[in-house]
Amino acid sequence: MSAPDPPPDPSTLLSPPFITVAGIPNFRDLGGYPVASPSNHSIKREVIYRCAEPSQVTKDGITTMQRLGITHIYDLRSNNEIQRAEAAGRGGVVEWEGCERVFVPVFADKDYSPENLAVRYFDYSSGPEVCLLHLTLNFCVG
């Protein structure tokens, strides 16, 4: 039996819109996606980024975000989510000079355990609610 292959280098797996930012999974540019109106327009590239859990970003990751020109981070996590990450040893809020953290939690400070999230998502899918993401033309190119 041969030895298993070594894991691939993650940086070689990513391609646009994904960007390697050390310590942050799933970091990507939201630019380039078409918008419905006006037609033949899309979201500007290198203006809006999104990522998963940011609390384990490394110094190299911060350097990458500085190089990308990121000056504001809109943190959508609730206080409870941040506290759980800290308690699990994954870190909490990371801030650095030249970047402002804007705290805008999507969820209230409630219990969002997997069981309670399942109930919440069931409620979302059972009603007539519609979600809207509004982007001004400043983020669009034609």
Image (cartoon, rainbow, N blue to C red):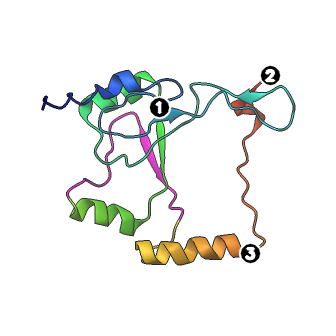
Q: Can residue 83 be seen in this view?
A: yes
Disc 1 marks a residue whose amino acid type is Ile
Image coordinates for residue 4, horizontal then vertical, percent = 18, 32
Q: Is mark 3 on a helix, strand or loop?
A: loop
The spot of residue 81 in percent (x, y) is 37, 64
Question: Overall secondary structure of the magenta stretch?
Answer: loop
How far, Cα to Cα, is label 1 from label 3? 37 Å
**Residue 110 horizontal/vertical position (percent):** 45, 77
Q: Residue 127 carries which label?
A: 3
Of mark 3 and mark 2, the one earlier in the sequence is 3
Residue 43's disc number:
none
Q: Can residue 110 be seen in this view?
A: no
> Neighbour class for label 2 at 10 Å: few (<14), some, many (≥20)?
few
For the residues labelled 1 and 3, say whether their Cβ atoms are less than 8 Å apart. no
Q: Which of marks 1 and 3 is in front?
A: 3
Q: Would you say residue 108 sits in the magenta stretch?
A: no
Q: Is residue 8 shown above or below 111? A: above
What amino acid type should be assigned to the residue bearing mark 3? Gly
Find numbered disc 2 in the image and state the secondary structure of the residue it sits on.
loop
In the picture of the structure, the residue carrying the numbered disc 2 is 142
Q: Give the range drawn in magenta.
A: 89-106
